[in-house]
Amino acid sequence: IMTRARDLADYIAASGTLLQTQFTQTDATANFTPSGVLSRTLITNLAVSITPTSTSSKIMLTAQVGFEVTGNMANIVFGFDRGGTRIGAATAGNRNVGVLAPYIGFHNDATSTLEGIVYTFFDTPSTTSAVTYTADFTINGTNALNLNKTVNDSNDGDHERTVSFIMAQEIAG
């Protein structure tokens, strides 16, 4: 006899079924400055919590980040943090690693042209406790990431503003 909602969810949900979606979306602007070269920096405006219904669930993470880097944005890589641990980063010695590097657009203009990235990673947290995920980045330098705005942020047609989000979707395992 099934006595709990979680038992019912486990019984009904076939592997691959989308069980829930949680997200944080923001148009707020902020600056995030790394503490050192290749130091992981959390984008604290882009955090989301999800409570998996089963320890076998997968969590599909997706982030969309509108940004401009103060100065040179060479070698920037984006990833995810799960409760203080970086996830989705390849193990590769002293390299700058993450889920994805942005497709560079007009990176020679470091004051008035936004860049953007959308990236996804599948996590297996193996828990039914709440998990908090945060978007993060590393860069080969200490240049600030300006979230949802250009560096100069002038109020004219040459300086963009965007909306960024992070989404966590539970998929039955």
Image (cartoon, rainbow, N blue to C red):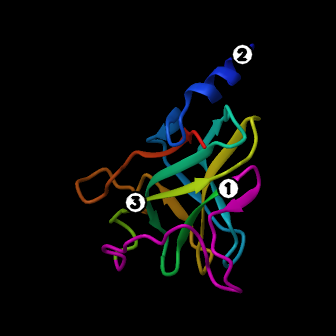
* Amino acid type, mark 2: Met
The question of residue 102 being in magenta is answered with yes
Q: Is residue 21 visible?
A: no
- Mark 3 sits on what residue? 150
Position of 14 relative to 126 (above/below): above
Tell me if residue 68 comes above or below residue 27 in the rendering. below
Which picture quadrant has residue 8? top right
In the rendered image of this protein, does residue 85 appear above or below residue 54? below
Quarter holding the N terminus? Answer: top right
Is 18 left, or right, of 10 in this rendering?
A: left
- Viewer-nearest residue: 42 or 4: 4
Q: Please name the predominant secondary structure of the magenta segment in the image.
A: loop
Q: Which residue is mark 1?
A: 81
Element assignment for label 1: strand
The residue pinned by badge 2 equals 2
SS at badge 3? loop
Quadrant for the C terminus, please: top right
Q: Residues within 10 Å of mark 1 (few under 14, many from 20)?
A: many
In primary-sequence order, the first of circles 3 and 1 is 1
Residue 153 location in percent, x, y? 39, 56
Depth check, front residue: 111 or 1 = 1
